[in-house]
Structure formats: C-alpha cells, structure tokens
Image (spheres, rainbow, N blue to C red):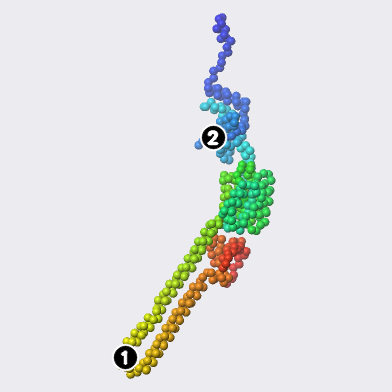
Amino acid sequence: MNTSDFSKTLVPTRQIWAVGALCLAVSDALSARFNPVAVQGEVSGFTRASSGHCYFTLKDTGGQLRCAFFKRAAQTLNRDLKDGDEIVAEGRLGVYSARGELQMVVESVRLKGRGNLFEEFLRIKAKLESEGLFDPSLKRDISPNPKGIGVVTSLQAAALHDVLSALRRRVPHIPVVVANSPVQGAQAPLALMTSLRSLYDRDDLGVILLVRGGGSMEDLWCFNDEQLARLIRQSPVPIISGVGHETDFTIADFCADLRAPTPTAAAELCAVSREVLLDSLEALQDDLTGAIQSGLDTRSQTLDRLHERLGRPSTFLSKQQARLSLLSQRLLPSLRASTKESEYELAQLKSRHDRAWREALLDKRRTLESAQLRLGLLDPALVLDRGYAWLSDSSGRAIMDATGLKAGEHIQATLSKAKLSLNVLEVENLKN
C-alpha cells in the first residue's frame, strides 16, 4: 500500500448537503432547541399584505429577527403594530428556505408595558359603554357664555399655563376657578374626584375643564378610572375633557360632554370669545341705529309733505288781494256809491281771512307737534327710561313672550343705564 492510499483511508468523507435539505435540517434543529419561543424587541417595518398576513422585523441593539404574522393569528390584534412598538412576540423559530433566512412565525403579540393596560382600557370601555355612560343623548351643549369656568388639573402642570393663557386672551370677563389635583400616579383618581366634587358644590360655574398634557398610557391611566368616569357623568354642569394630545383617548373623554384634542383646545371650546360677543353687540347696535334713523327719515318726509300742502301764507294773501283789486276795478262805479259799506265788508273779509289763516296755521302746527310727539314716543330709549327692559336670549334674539323659556335658562335684560344677566327660575304663563 502506498502512502497516498493510506492517507485516503484516514480522511473521513464530508457530507454534501442540498441547499433545501440543509435549510430544513437547520430549521428542525432550531425547533428542537428553542421552540416554542418568546422574543422581546422593537417593531420595525410593519406591513400588512392584501392577503391579511403581516410582516415586520423585531430588533434591539444586539440584532434583528424577521417575523411573519399570518392572517389567522394577526386577526387577534386590536390594531396594527407600528414602528417603535415594544412587544413580546411568541411563536416558533425556523428557516425561510426561499431566502435562507432565520424567521420567526409569530402566533401572539403582547405590547410590553402597555398590552395589559390597553386590554384593561378596552374592558372598562366596553363595560361603561354597555351601561350607557357614553350615550350621545347624555351629552349637554356648552353654553356660549358660561357664568364661570372651573379647571381641574395640577398647579404644576404646563397644561394649566396654556389653559389660563387661552382663557385670559379669549374670555377675560369670565371668572375662572382652579381645583388643584395630581394628574398622574396611583393617588390621582381619588384626588381628581375630590377636586371635581369641590366644583360641583359651587353655583357660580357654567362649565368645567378636565385637562392634562400628553404622556404615555401609564401617565394618563388615572383618567381611565371607572369611578372617575361615573362621577364625570354626575356633573351638574357640562364637562370638557382635554387630556393628552390629539391622538390620546381616555375613558374620561368618552364620558365628558365634549372632548377637546388638547388642553388649549378645551379652553377655546368652553365659551365664545369676547371679540365675537363684541362684534355681535356692535352689529345689534348698528341694526337698532339704522331702524331709528329710518323711522326719523320717514317722519321727516311726512313733515315736508304737510309743509308743502300748507304753503306760504303771504302767497295766499297776495292772491286774495289781487282778486280784491280786480273786483274793485269792475265794481268801481257801484263801490263809489257805497264806499263805507264796501270798506266795512272788506274789513270783515280781511278779518275772516286772517282768522281762517291763523286757525289753519294753528291746526297744522298742532298736527306737526302731534307727529313729533308720536315720533318721540317711538324712541326705544324712552321706553327703557320708563322702567321697562328689553329681554333677549343667549343668542341675542328678542324675547317677545315666555313661550319656549325653561327654568335655568340664561337671558339678558337691557335697562336704560345697564345690562343684566338673568337666570330663569320659573316660567308661569298668565291666563287671559
């Protein structure tokens, strides 16, 4: 035996794998060693195919793992995953032979640190919704001009500064009462309820703002408290929630009469701004001034027509004198014969003419004075000076009778020298 033959007998024969067979063997080895497996990481590149299957990459600082989440299992998701979600995925490791890549077939997903909270949020939401706490018919309209505004938040919260700045800018004429409460942590729900009750006991508020800045679900969790939700629905006045940012939703948002996307938006929705009210008042003043001026113009035209009909007394007298002169010339022979009689008759005629003219002038003057008096009596200011008041509803429309008024409704009374804001205590229709 030569040396080369001896060497061949010492070297073992190496198995040559087909690619597919090797991928299958590695997959089997992984399955036997690891499966089932749970992996924690951050979602990246999540997509949902038209088939309903989902694909994403699970990564951390040490590596990344491709994941397939097939339609049957992906249907259990309450929402699509998004890049940046921190999750714990459970499933089975294997090799995707078509690409020769390590792959995890995901069977279930739980949001790390949020999944349990989100499930609890959905549970509370479903429970309260079934009890009717979110019924749209329970939502109350927000008064455009509340007598006072309550704010429940933390004195240290940046949201409070934003809210107060917006209120000072828009409605500086409306008083604001702040009830301090922590808005994060285990003790926050009880503190929020205590602050709300303190505002419920007041009778000088027309709306309450429940506000807090943005944060994680854990930060906002106190606003998902079931007892707080029930207390919100017991509020004697409408409540506007402004919790978190526009994409944040809490149970308090569903129970409130109105949900604002941010705390500042809540301040903007709680009342009509002073500028809008002043513009409306100016428009009403313009309408009233125009109506009065129109009335004055109409009566001035009437006076002008009366004056034209009356004419100038001197013109009337000149005509009469010309006629008298003509008659005198025609009847000169006869007049000379009865001069004294004619002069007497002339004097009588002139006297009657003067008296008739004076009486006609006096009658026209009386008519003029009467028209001026009636015009003056139409001045709304005189009516108010006599102790009357002009009533209007919250939108500025005049109240002609009690039809449609309800107890508790806000109205306004305009007096001669002041305006009063009133609340209707009782409506009693008088019998004819």
- Of badges 1 and 2, the one in the foreground is 1
Give left or right: position of 318 versus 260.
left
Q: Amino acid at mark 1?
A: Leu
Q: Residue at x 58, y 25 (%)?
A: 27
Judge whether residue 279 can be spotted in this image: yes
Q: Nearer the viewer, residue 105 or 334?
A: 334
In what element is the residue under mark 1? loop
Mark 2, residues whose alpha carbon is within 10 Å: few (<14), some, or many (≥20)? few
Q: Nearer the viewer, residue 14 or 322?
A: 322
The residue carrying mark 1 is 331
Q: Amino acid at mark 2?
A: Gly
- Give residue 45's mark: 2
Q: Residue at x 41, y 88 (%)?
A: 351
Q: Residue at x 39, y 88 (%)?
A: 349
Quarter assignment of residue 96: top right
- Answer with mark 1 or mark 2, whichever residue precedes in sequence: 2
**Is label 1 in contact with label 2 (beta carbons under 8 Å)?**
no
